[in-house]
Amino acid sequence: MPELPEVETVRRGLMPVLEGATLSRVSVRRPDLRFPFPERFTERLEGATVLRIDRRAKYLLLRLSTGETWITHLGMTGRFTLDGDPAGLFEDVVPTGGKHEHFVACADLGGQLTRLGYADARRFGFMGLIPTEAVDDHPWFRQLGPEPLGNGFSGNHLAEAFANRKQNIKVSLLDQSVVAGLGNIYVCEALYRSGISPELAAGKVSGSRLDRLATEVRHVLDDAIRAGGSTLKDFANVEGGQGYFQHSFDVYGREGEPCRTPACKGTIHRIVQGGRSTFYCPVCQAR
């Protein structure tokens, strides 16, 4: 599933083309993705101008001139694509984005037309239209914790959220009410960089170690965003290119390989926590 750096990469790829653009010729090629498309979805999008594109956790939020916000969650295989030469690409007979393309629109930015497509092979993604003033109170958003790259995230915040928590810190960091947008890959990497065992109870981690953890969460996310995210199987940016951060993983997916910390003789282990694979170095991340 695309995590925060991948969704942020998509947002940054869409911004130059869609912000300020007016949507037209909107078409959906099936009634639903994970959930049904909103009522009158195409009519509500056509003629709307995209004022701004934001990200909240793993959601994309396109703020529209109509007073609504177009929400997209990419699920596991959702992918937006842009084509700068949309002439003739809107025929209904042959979906130019492939058999899994379920949405297409034309974006007009000062007379420059761009074809916007959305494909989703497994259809775990979804879209919504919510009044902009109601977004924060919507069930998708109202329980989310602070953004890990925002001012509300810190070691102090983690200390308050984890007070007396007996659950292990790995699973606790995946709790979206604690911090929004963190996923399995980047939690593993941040815990390694912080030297914290994923098996340690969240409430047992000291304040100074939580300060370092908060810093390393920011660093690993920033590094991943600069690398265009991670492509393990399906993720691609809006131009169809892959991310490159997977080549920099210290622990994720490296079971049995030597630890990259200089002078460490350990190897990367894999355990299962909360139904998810956890990768770590038991030497560098000793309890």
Image: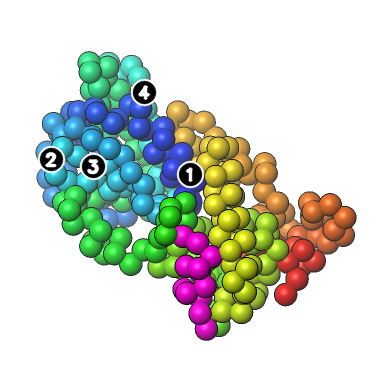
The amino acid beneath tag 2 is: Thr
| Place of residue 40 in the rendered image (x, y in percent of width and height, measured from the top left) | 12, 45
Q: Mark 4 points at which residue?
A: 83
Seen from the viewer's position, the closer of residues 57 and 150 is 150
Q: Label 4 crowding class (10 Å Cα cut-off): few <14, some 14-19, many 20+?
A: some
Distance in Å between CA atoms under marks 1 and 3: 20 Å
Q: Which mark is residue 66?
A: 2
Q: What stretch is highlighted in magenta?
A: 153-164
Task: Tell me the SS state at disc 4.
Answer: strand
63 w.r.t. 98: above or below: below
Residue at point 25%, 22% (across, down) = 109
The amino acid beneath tag 1 is: Glu
| Place of residue 169 in the rendered image (x, y in percent of width and height, measured from the top left) | 58, 72
Residue 168, picture quadrant:
bottom right
Dot 4 and dot 1 residues touching (CB under 8 Å): no
Seen from the viewer's position, the closer of residues 115 and 191 is 191
Task: Tell me the SS state at disc 1.
Answer: helix
Q: Earlier in the sequence, mark 4 or mark 3?
A: 3
Question: Does 163 lie within the magenta span?
Answer: yes
Q: In this view, does 201 lie to the left or right of 41?
A: right
32 w.r.t. 198: above or below: above
Residue 21, picture quadrant:
top left
Q: Mark 1 points at which residue?
A: 6
Q: Mark 3 points at which residue?
A: 63
Q: Label 3 crowding class (10 Å Cα cut-off): few <14, some 14-19, many 20+?
A: many
